[in-house]
Image (spheres, helix red, strand yellow):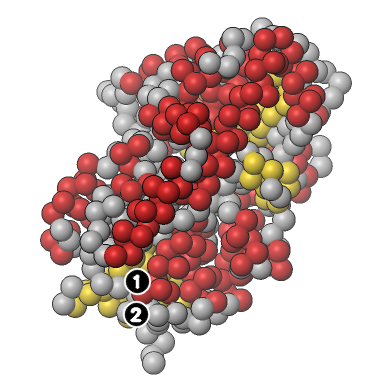
């Protein structure tokens, strides 16, 4: 075996590619990871853009990472250290706020300050949503059945799905269908009356998606983001020590400990095939690597339309991938701050900075932010999901200084009549003005500002149109149909060519499931 021959090659060193490579290497395969950038991580990186200030440029929190991955890859031994984000702070737009923490009863009382009726509904809301989450967890953590296949195993898988759904109570099934097909607004209106309470919960329904909380399909996004957990706590979030770049470094160490090799600055341009079978890859500089298994951790468009020759694929698959919706609408605005901002109603505490800052005061505010995106423009008053990460991990900034990571919507990939090069700083000004309106004097604290547009996300990470989920969360693009009907089980029509990116089931976020479940498919096909 020469130095350019391996048992498996993984294209892309993001978190799914690293997870996948670690599992293959653990199973004894000589595995090579090829990453185009100068460091691993993909969209989950941490960068020092200002001396002493660590920025989570793109992805910025952990929640949906599956607990099995932590244990099966012994990630704790390689430095896995999640820091819980115990609070969520939501300014209501009138000088007041909602502040949620770990204590459920205190959260009920916090809602009661605004609405006695909503406090009474709060328990019912979470109970009903948790029941739906528990019902779909087995679907979330297992490959989708191939409902289009003729193999006897496909029939067994379909029967399992029908039996599982048939065992659920009527209300849970109805709630599930409502969330998968309807709007978050319709769902939330059944429980809450106070606009700020609805606005807080609606924020989970629009993350990374070209929908507003009143759009059909936003219920699915809401449900997906409630599937996360840490230490068995459903819906909880954490921040990894050193940011998500710290987490992907943990994955890289785990993969290398099992024997995987990682090459950086290795831009893969072509899949090499012989007789309809994948046999290796070629780099931009002409270097070739050979392996009987090639796995793409890239998004579906790059996996099927760029790495390989579409003429080698079935026409219906190519057509489906070409129609797949990406439409990135998310940007990041990251700040280095001279000190902590002050919220006037809470001048003498920093407890509200222990987790997320949710700047979307009401459901109507978020929906109006979405209005501009419908017509190809960015929000004048955007929704912001922020975190002052140096409060959670003080090593992210010099003593007394802070870094603030802001996820901002809406910022369409394509701007009508302009470009992001022309609009970048104006958009950053819009986001900063929103923060100034809630935290007076915020602008005076800014030492450095970084504006990351969807075009930047695409250029640096390879995510098509800057879509953070490698394909929008729309019902026709999920489960059986992710990334395309008949190809939701990580294989491709080319023998030896597989997919393990976020464009496969169950989807995006720093979750790892696509990498893990794709490895199970590869190892099964190899008889391992």
| Residues packed near mark 2 inside 10 Å, few (<14), some (14 to 19) or many (20 plus) | many
Camera sees residue 341: no
Query: In the image, 195: left or right of 312?
Result: right
The residue at 67%/10% (across/down) is 117
Camera sees residue 110: yes
Give the vertical position of 476 relative to 153 (above or below). above
* Distance in Å between CA atoms under marks 1 and 2: 7 Å
Residue at numbered disc 1: 294
Residue at numbered disc 2: 291
The residue at 43%/74% (across/down) is 523
In front: 268, or 311? 311
Quarter holding the N terminus is bottom left
The residue at 65%/17% (across/down) is 121
Give the vertical position of 456 relative to 103 (above or below). below
In front: 219, or 454? 219
Residue 186, image x, y percentages: 46, 17
Give the vertical position of 3 relative to 215 (above or below). below
- CB within 8 Å, label 1 to label 2: yes
Name the element at disc 1: strand
Q: How many marks?
A: 2
Residue 497, image x, y percentages: 30, 68
In front: 56, or 233? 233
């Amino acid at each position: 075996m020469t130095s350019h021959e391996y048992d498996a090659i993984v294209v892309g060193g993001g978190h799914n590619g690293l997870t996948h490579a670690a599992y293959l290497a653990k199973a004894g395969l000589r595995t090579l990871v090829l990453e185009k950038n100068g460091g691993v991580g993909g969209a989950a990186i941490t960068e020092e853009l200002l001396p002493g200030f660590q920025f989570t440029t793109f992805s910025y929190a952990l929640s949906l990472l599956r607990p099995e991955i932590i244990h099966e890859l012994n990630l704790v031994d390689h430095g896995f250290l999640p820091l819980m984000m115990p609070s969520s702070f939501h300014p209501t737009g009138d000088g007041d706020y909602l502040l949620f923490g770990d204590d459920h009863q205190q959260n009920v009382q916090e809602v009661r300050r605004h609405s006695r009726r909503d406090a009474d509904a709060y328990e019912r809301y979470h109970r009903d949503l948790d029941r739906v989450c528990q019902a779909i967890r087995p679907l979330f953590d297992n490959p989708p059945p191939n409902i289009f296949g003729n193999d006897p195993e496909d029939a067994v898988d379909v029967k399992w799905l029908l039996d599982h759904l048939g065992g659920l109570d009527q209300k849970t099934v109805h709630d599930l269908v409502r969330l998968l097909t309807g709007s978050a607004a319709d769902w939330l209106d059944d429980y809450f009356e106070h606009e700020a309470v609805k606005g807080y919960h609606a924020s989970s329904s629009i993350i990374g998606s070209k929908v507003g909380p009143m759009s059909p399909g936003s219920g699915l996004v809401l449900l997906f983001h409630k599937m996360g957990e840490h230490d068995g706590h459903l819906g909880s979030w954490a921040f990894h020590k050193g940011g998500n770049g710290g987490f992907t470094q943990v994955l890289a160490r785990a993969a290398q400990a099992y024997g995987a090799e990682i090459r950086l600055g290795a831009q893969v341009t072509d899949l090499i095939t012989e007789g309809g079978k994948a046999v290796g890859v070629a780099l931009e500089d002409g270097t070739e690597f050979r392996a009987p298994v090639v796995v793409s951790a890239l998004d579906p468009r790059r996996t099927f339309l760029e790495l390989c020759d579409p003429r080698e694929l079935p026409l219906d698959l190519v057509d489906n991938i070409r129609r797949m919706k990406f439409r990135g609408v998310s940007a990041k605005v990251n700040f280095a701050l001279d000190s902590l901002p002050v919220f006037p109603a809470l001048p003498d505490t920093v407890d509200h900075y222990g987790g997320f800052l949710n700047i979307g005061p009401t459901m109507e505010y978020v929906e109006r932010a979405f209005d501009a995106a419908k017509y190809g423009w960015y929000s004048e008053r955007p929704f912001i999901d922020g975190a002052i990460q140096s409060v959670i991990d003080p090593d992210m900034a010099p003593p007394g200084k802070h870094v603030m990571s802001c996820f901002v919507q809406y910022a369409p990939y394509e701007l009508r009549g302009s470009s992001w090069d022309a609009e970048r700083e104006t958009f950053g000004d819009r986001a900063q003005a929103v923060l100034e309106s809630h935290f007076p004097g915020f602008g005076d604290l800014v030492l450095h500002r970084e504006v990351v547009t969807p075009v930047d996300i695409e250029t640096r990470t390879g995510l098509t149109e800057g879509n953070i989920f490698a394909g929008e969360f729309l019902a026709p693009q999920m489960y059986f149909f992710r990334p395309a009907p008949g190809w939701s089980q990580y294989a491709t029509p080319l023998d030896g060519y597989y997919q393990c990116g976020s464009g496969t089931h169950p989807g995006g976020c720093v979750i790892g499931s696509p990498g893990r479940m794709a490895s199970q498919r590869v190892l099964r096909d190899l008889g391992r």
